[in-house]
Image: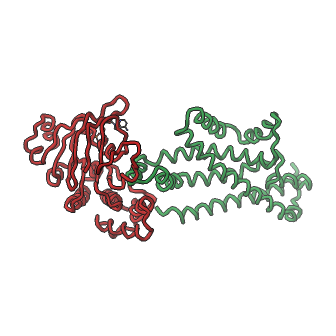
Amino acid sequence: MIEIKELHKYFGALHVLKGIDLNVQKGEVLSIIGASGSGKSTLLYCTNGLEAIQKGEVIVDGVSVHSKGTDLNKLRTKMGMVFQQWNSFPHLTALENVALAPKIVKGKSKSEAREIARQQLEHVGLGDKIDNYPSALSGGQQQRLAIARALAMEPEYMLFDEATSALDPELVGEVLDTMRLLAEEGMTMICVTHEMGFARDVSDRVAFFHQGVMEEIGPPQQIFGEPTSEHTAKFLANVR
Amino acid sequence: MNFDYTFHWRPVMRKLPDLLEASLTTLQISVLSMIIGITFGLILAILRMNGPKPLAWIATGWVELARNTPALFQLFFFSFGLGAFGLHLTPYFIVLAGLTFNNAGYLAENFRGGFQAVPETQMRAARSLGMTAWQSYTRIVIPQVFRIVYHPMTNQLVWAVLMSSLAMIVGFRELAGETQALAFKTFRIFEYFAVTALIYYVMVKVILGLSRLIAWRMFRY
Ligand SMILES: Nc1ncnc2c1ncn2[C@@H]1O[C@H](COP(=O)(O)OP(=O)(O)O)[C@@H](O)[C@H]1O
Ligand SMILES: [Mg+2]
């Protein structure tokens, strides 16, 4: 379970997250929507400790992420993350991209790591691309590669930061399908997304962020059907 | 105008083994100055990007001097310059220090550009997988930087080989120094320098060819 309590984040004088309270249960799929600059990415970075926080607490399975003694590298192995910019490692083949972290972070043997990598590439539909370098893959394939790379660490949680935003429209579907597949398999997911269809169909809950505040959170039918905040209503009217 | 110089190649050919041996010295000192220069260049680049202010300034000063003053003067600094302070290096170390100083300055700029060309998101992605900062640098960032600076590094090695010929001015007998010593003993000055120029040419071509071969084997992406 991920517990976010009274979280405040500043970049210098800029108050980016203004007291976020949020729990994500095992098996849950949460989508986060909101205008650009509202702090959605920052929340994800604070959740896996890529960004420091100024106040509050993030607790993952009982471990306080930002406490001094916390082994962040170990903690991150249970939280996979997929970013907006495709950042496959260009100097490694698809297989090497996926096998590297299991080998050097988890200490798996070379053959074990390669076997895991093969399975995960198969899993996201890239079984026929294992020896390709990322430069030979489309954007959608690179994002699926990034998903496979994260899954190879056998994470308990997956964080998606607008995984489809930088893709050509015709490539969005294949990545969303992969994310859907993970949701069906019971993965716990936090998805920052601009894909309202995905948020509506796949998530258990949808949260709307506005200027560093979580304005409202609820089941998709409620958020999309009868939003209580006027900011939510306005945002949804604009994206439709 | 009457041109009555007759070429005599035989004396040069007789000394060819000496010239070839001296060209090994040239290669040896150039390669060594590259290895040390790469190490210092990396340190300078990192200091300039992330170092504490005074160290960053020193690094910047080094890079600026190395790139914007004549290489010959840099060599003079390590001979006459240090000599003025009572520090007398042997000709070998004068040349090694001069070449290394110059290499490090140029390479630091290449490395800095290389680091800047690797997107920050690569580091982020690596860290998000649980890699340590060290693992992320050595497995993800530096291999990419290395590819970016590979050709500039080859060029710097070529430059070091050619620049090492300045060593004859401080009396070190690498290829150029040896050539000068022999040439003025026999007065076959043109012949000696022509043959030596050819040796330099072949050395450079071999370095470039090898470098291309290695790149082709190493960079598959
Ligand atoms: N590293 C940073 N340094 C300074 N400001 C930042 C940084 N990252 C994000 N911000 C600022 O924080 C705010 C929230 O950004 P972000 O979390 O990326 O929003 P979103 O993902 O919702 O678009 C924005 O105003 C952004 O400019
Ligand atoms: Mg964002």
Identify the colour of chain A in the image. red
Asked if B51 appears above or below A164 in the picture, the reply is above
| Towards the viewer: A215 or A200 | A215
Relative to residue B64, is residue A176 depicted above or below? below
Compare residues A115 and A177 and report the one nearer the observer: A115
Q: Is residue B25 left or right of residue A222?
A: right
Image point (73%, 54%), residue name: B29
Residue A82 vertical placement versus B56 (above, below): below
In the foreground, A186 or A132: A186
Colour assigned to chain B in the rendering is green
**Horizontal placement of B146 versus B157: left or right?**
left
- What x and y, as percent, mark residue B99? 71, 47
Query: Residue A198's spot in the image, x, y percent?
Result: 18, 53
Q: Position of residue A211 (x, y in %)?
A: 24, 34
Task: Say whether residue B98 is visible.
Answer: yes
Vertical comparison of A14 with B98: above or below? above
Q: Quadrant of residue A47?
A: top left
Residue A138, visible in the rendered structure: no
Residue A224 percent across, percent down from the top left: 11, 45
Give left or right: position of A1 versus B191: left
**x 86%, y 53%: residue:** B189
